[in-house]
Structures are given as structure tokens and as C-alpha cells.
Image (cartoon, grey):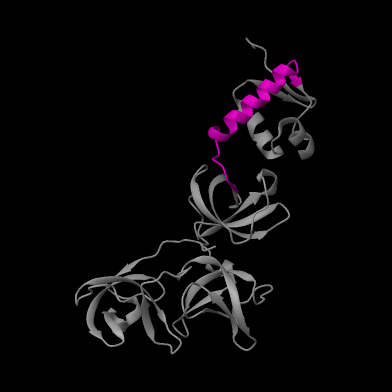
């Protein structure tokens, strides 16, 4: 699935992005558009807008055709320059690289030098779409880390973000955040495995002091922890005010007793402790008696 970063440009053609370009003239091959410093750019006849006249602007995507000429299309590719996307590998050339289906007539080149991990025809690859400075051509790369934002992020806990699942780790899944940074979705908090390349709506769970980011697929904070805290209080009342669960309990014990991850349990009892509703001891958690 494509990553979905938003890109737009106006009046002067920008290669690899959506443009709004004025019609200059009509000719047998199609319409020629004003590409600014790029000169006139052909919009082939099969993409002709009905009733197009000189001076009228047309929304197009600009790229290079098989003869390396700039050309426009009213179609939208699966990914543009600056996007991360999970694309199908349609063919390979051992001396050149792989070719990816990005929804246009001319496939997108993944140069051999930009491989990372196994690339096989018929499979898929998570790539970043970029403009190669040496050739001025749109290409893909699997070397994703070089295209992430290295500046400290300014997200806030609970902030809604767009995620792309990058890879699986022992703890869960590494995900790209807003096409800029990476964070971790913990396996213990997920109801099912996540497909690599999947695009998801997520939330910033925790901004760590070491710069790492914990993610979630549901809202964080009191909206999530409030119901979990009340669930623990209800279980304590049923058990007479004490339960033998604490920080050293195993994740399996916590999930069996409360149907939640150990991380969620620790966050929820932290809320209850700060509200002076429970005490946490070496033998478990205990309700605070009224008046204490």
C-alpha cells in the first residue's frame, strides 16, 4: 500500500509531484503545457481534458517517459517523490535493477545499488521514491534510513499520526511516522500481526528521553487508561481489596488476569497510584481504604 504523503506544486513543473500547469497549445500528439524552466511538457492525447483551451490549467503528474523526455499525465501514481510505498516488483534486470509497478505506464526503477535485503520478481518492496541527482530521474530506494528526518521530533503524547509498517522486530513492528521518523508498535498491544508495508492510523504513545518513540493503534492517555484503571479497581473489589500482581508479574499472568498487556497494566496502576486509590507492594496491589 502507498504511504500517502501529500505533495503539490503550481505553475512551474516539479518532477515527480502533482502540478497545476497552464495549457500552451494543442498539437496532434496532445496538449503542450507550460513547464516553466523545463519548457513545454507534452500531455498525450489520451489524457486530454474535454474542452481544454490555451491558458486553462490542468492538474498533472510530471515524470520521464521511456525515452527520458518529460511527460505529463492526469493519472496519479501510487507514490510520488518524497513518499514511502510498498510496491510490487514486476521484473528484474541483473545489470540494472528491479522495476516496480507504481500505477503508470512506465515502471519505476529500483537501481541495483539501492537494494537492501531480498528482492524477487513478483514480491513487494517497501521503498522511498526520490529524484536521483545524477540523472534527474525518478527512482526508488530500499535504503530508507537515509531519507528519514534526523532532527529531534516534536510530537506530543496522544498525537494522531500516519504510520507505515516498515519491519518486524523481536518486540513488535518498526513503523515510519508521518514519512519522517520511526517508532515501535509493541507486539503485546496488538490484536493480530501487521503486514509489512501496511498504512495505518496510529498515535504517539511515549516520547522517550533517548529519542525513541513508542506507538499505539488506539488513543493514549486517560481515554485509554481510564477504562483499564477502572477494570483493575473492579477486580480488586471483587477480590476483597488485594491482588497478587505487580511489576514483577509475568506478561502471561497479567493477560490472563486482566486481558491486557503488562505495559498497559503498569500504566493503569501508575494512574491509580498517583490518584492515591491503590498502594503497590512486593505482594501485589491493594485498594486504599476510604479516609486514608
| Residue at the (63%, 30%) spot, across then down | 228
Which quadrant would residue 248 be assigned to in this image? top right
Q: Position of residue 204 (x, y in %)?
A: 54, 46
Q: Position of residue 243 (x, y in %)?
A: 76, 23
Give yes or no for residue 118 being in the magenta stretch.
Answer: no
Q: Please state, as top left, top right, bottom left or bottom right, where the N terminus lies in the image.
A: bottom right
Q: Position of residue 188 (x, y in %)?
A: 70, 45
* Depth order, front residue of 161/121: 121
Q: Would residue 53 be visible to someone looking at this image?
A: yes
Give yes or no for residue 219 being in the magenta stretch.
Answer: yes
Q: Please state, as top left, top right, bottom left or bottom right, where the C terminus lies in the image.
A: top right
Q: Position of residue 63 (x, y in %)?
A: 41, 79
Compared across the picture, whether 87 is left or right of 44 comes to right
Q: Is residue 156 above or below residue 260?
A: below
What secondary structure prevails in the magenta region?
A: helix
Counting labels gives 0
Compared across the picture, whether 12 is left or right of 90 comes to left
* Depth order, front residue of 224/277: 224
| Residue at the (63%, 60%) spot, across then down | 196
Which quadrant would residue 252 be assigned to in this image? top right
| Residue at the (65%, 87%) spot, across then down | 94
Q: Would residue 273 be visible to someone looking at this image?
A: no
* Depth order, front residue of 101/46: 46
| Residue at the (37%, 82%) spot, across then down | 71
Compared across the picture, whether 225 is left or right of 281 comes to left
Q: Which residues are magenta?
A: 215-242
Amino acid at each position: 500500500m502507498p504511504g500517502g504523503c501529500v505533495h503539490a506544486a503550481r505553475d512551474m513543473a516539479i518532477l515527480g509531484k502533482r502540478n497545476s500547469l497552464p495549457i500552451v497549445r494543442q498539437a496532434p500528439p496532445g496538449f503542450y503545457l507550460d513547464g516553466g524552466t523545463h519548457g513545454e511538457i507534452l500531455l498525450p492525447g489520451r489524457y486530454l481534458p474535454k474542452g481544454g483551451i490555451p491558458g486553462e490549467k490542468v492538474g498533472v503528474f510530471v515524470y520521464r517517459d521511456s525515452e527520458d523526455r518529460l511527460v505529463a499525465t492526469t493519472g496519479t501514481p501510487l507514490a510520488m517523490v518524497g513518499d514511502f510505498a510498498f510496491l510490487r516488483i514486476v521484473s528484474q534486470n541483473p545489470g540494472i535493477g528491479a522495476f516496480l509497478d507504481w500505477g503508470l505506464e512506465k515502471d519505476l526503477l529500483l537501481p541495483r545499488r539501492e537494494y537492501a535485503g531480498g528482492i524477487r520478481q513478483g514480491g513487494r518492496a517497501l521503498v522511498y521514491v526520490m529524484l536521483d541527482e545524477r540523472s534527474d530521474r525518478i527512482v526508488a530506494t530500499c535504503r530508507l534510513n537515509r531519507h528519514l528526518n534526523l532532527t529531534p521530533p516534536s510530537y506530543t503524547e496522544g498525537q494522531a499520526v500516519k504510520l507505515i509498517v516498515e519491519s518486524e522486530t523481536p518486540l513488535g513492528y518498526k513503523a515510519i511516522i508521518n514519512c519522517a521518523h520511526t517508532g515501535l508498535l509493541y507486539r503485546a498491544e496488538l490484536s493480530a500481526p501487521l503486514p509489512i508495508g501496511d498504512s495505518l492510523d496510529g498515535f504517539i504513545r511515549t516520547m522517550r528521553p533517548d529519542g525513541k518513540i513508542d506507538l499505539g493503534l488506539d488513543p493514549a492517555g486517560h481515554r485509554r487508561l481510564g477504562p483499564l484503571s477502572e477494570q483493575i479497581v473492579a477486580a480488586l473489589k471483587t477480590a476483597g481489596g488485594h491482588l497478587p500482581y505487580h511489576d514483577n508479574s509475568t506478561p502471561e499472568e497479567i493477560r490472563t488476569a486482566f486481558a491486557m498487556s503488562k505495559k498497559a497494566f503498569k500504566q493503569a496502576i501508575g494512574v491509580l497510584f498517583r490518584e492515591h486509590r491503590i498502594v503497590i507492594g512486593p505482594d501485589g496491589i491493594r485498594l486504599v481504604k476510604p479516609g486514608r
